[in-house]
């Protein structure tokens, strides 16, 4: 991150991370940890706020905060996956490990921040003995959508690896059953897609192991809509990032998605288990109302999910 862009001159950047993997590596780098520890002990902040889970850094800082009587706030993204099998593959086993270490962390925090009612309910199920502060603050992102790109919107886009929990089979059925509409589809993924069923004349696959925020935004600004036929979702950065670029969402009516996507206004919500014809009805609705829905999405992001709204929550926090 470029420190010159920081709104606060006393912001300090430690490490050189540019994505999730490098951020994890930076968190395990003892040189970075030593710098952070020295700053915390010398400056004695009132609070430490951690926005994401890190398997080592969060727990270390929580223990350091407790020893120095500093209040530790943890913004929990995923409290608990009830049905882990729905994620398939190794992910379902990783979730058990993740929740084990996250529980160790939660035992050492003063305040937990959650961003959806679904997350709040899951937290209550998983951490019944937690008696300290639990507060609600929406997910908010740096506004990268205020650009002058005026590319013609062309794609119907699916973002993320086509794993079982994201129901890529629904996406493929929509493609197969809309050939008469002459539409272009796009799949954006950081994992290679080798299955031949994804080879379709009107489906473009955008694969890179590292995809920048700018690249995601560039593709979303050229998308008519984002399709998110998820089987489960506590909250979704895909939905909010789509809104950032004025891109409506065609999504399953599950979890936290229904808390942020307004049916008929910023998206079209389809019940889990619906037929492909119901998905296509939603697709056609967005195609017919894309201009006004795009404006609604952009306004929804500005009003509720841009990081400019943090000022509305700081006193509360």
Image (spheres, rainbow, N blue to C red):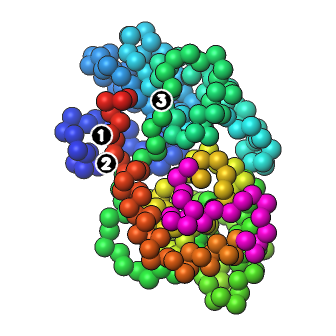
Tell me the crowding category of disc 1: few under 14, some 14 to 19, or many 20 or more residues within 10 angstroms, Cα based: few
Q: Residue at x 22, y 40 (%)?
A: 8
What residue is shown with label 2? 308
Pick whichever of labels 3 and 2 is earlier in the sequence.
Answer: 3
Q: Position of residue 168 (x, y in %)?
A: 72, 64
Q: Are marks 1 and 2 in contact (CB under 8 Å)?
A: yes
Q: Position of residue 127 (x, y in %)?
A: 64, 23
The residue segment tinted magenta is 259-278
Residue at the far front in the pictured view: 264
**Labelled disc at residue 311:** 1
Q: Is residue 58 visible?
A: no
Q: Quadrant of residue 227?
A: bottom right
Q: Position of residue 93 (x, y in %)?
A: 76, 38
Q: Residue at x 65, y 88 (%)?
A: 181
Q: Position of residue 252 (x, y in %)?
A: 67, 59
Residue 219 vs residue 206, the one in the foreground: 219
Q: Residue at x 51, y 17 (%)?
A: 132
Residue 198 vs residue 292, the one in the foreground: 292
**Secondary structure found at label 2:** helix
**Secondary structure found at label 1:** helix
> Could you tell me which quadrant the C terminus lies in?
top left
**Secondary structure found at label 3:** strand
Tell whether 1 sits left or right of 21. Answer: left
What residue is shown with label 3? 135
Residue 13 vs residue 309, the one in the foreground: 309
C-alpha gap between disc 3 and disc 1: 16 Å
Query: In this rendering, which labeled residue sits more in front, label 3 or label 2?
Result: 3
Residue 122 vs residue 167, the one in the foreground: 122
C-alpha gap between disc 1 and disc 2: 7 Å
Tell whether 289 sits left or right of 176. Answer: left
Pick whichever of labels 3 and 1 is earlier in the sequence.
Answer: 3
């Amino acid at each position: 991150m470029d420190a010159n862009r920081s709104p606060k001159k006393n912001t300090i950047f430690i490490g050189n991370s540019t994505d999730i993997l490098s951020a994890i590596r930076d968190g395990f780098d003892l040189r970075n940890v030593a710098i952070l520890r020295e700053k915390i002990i010398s400056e004695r902040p009132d609070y430490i706020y951690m926005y994401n889970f890190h398997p080592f850094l969060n727990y270390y800082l929580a223990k350091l905060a407790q020893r120095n009587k500093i209040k530790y706030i943890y913004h929990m993204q995923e409290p608990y996956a009830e049905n882990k099998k729905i994620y398939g593959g190794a992910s379902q086993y990783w979730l058990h490990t993740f929740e084990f270490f996250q529980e160790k962390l939660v035992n050492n925090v003063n305040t937990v921040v959650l961003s959806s009612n679904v997350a709040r309910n899951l937290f209550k199920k998983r951490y019944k003995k937690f008696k300290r502060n639990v507060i609600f603050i929406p997910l908010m992102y740096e506004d990268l959508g205020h650009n002058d790109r005026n590319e013609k919107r062309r794609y119907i886009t699916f973002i993320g690896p086509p794993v079982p929990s994201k129901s890529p089979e629904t996406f493929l059925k929509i493609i197969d059953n809309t050939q008469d509409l002459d539409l272009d589809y796009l799949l954006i993924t950081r994992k290679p897609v080798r299955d031949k069923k994804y080879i379709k004349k009107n489906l473009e696959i955008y694969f890179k192991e590292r995809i920048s925020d700018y690249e995601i935004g560039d593709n979303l600004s050229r998308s008519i809509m984002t399709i998110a036929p998820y089987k489960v979702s506590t909250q979704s950065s895909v939905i909010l990032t789509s809104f950032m670029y004025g891109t409506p969402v065609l999504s399953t009516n599950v979890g936290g998605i229904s808390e942020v996507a307004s049916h008929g206004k910023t998206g079209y919500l389809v019940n889990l288990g619906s037929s492909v014809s119901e998905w296509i009805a939603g697709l056609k609705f967005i195609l017919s109302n894309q201009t006004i829905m795009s404006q609604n999405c952009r306004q929804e992001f500005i009003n509720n999910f841009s990081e400019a709204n943090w000022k509305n929550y700081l006193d509360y926090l």
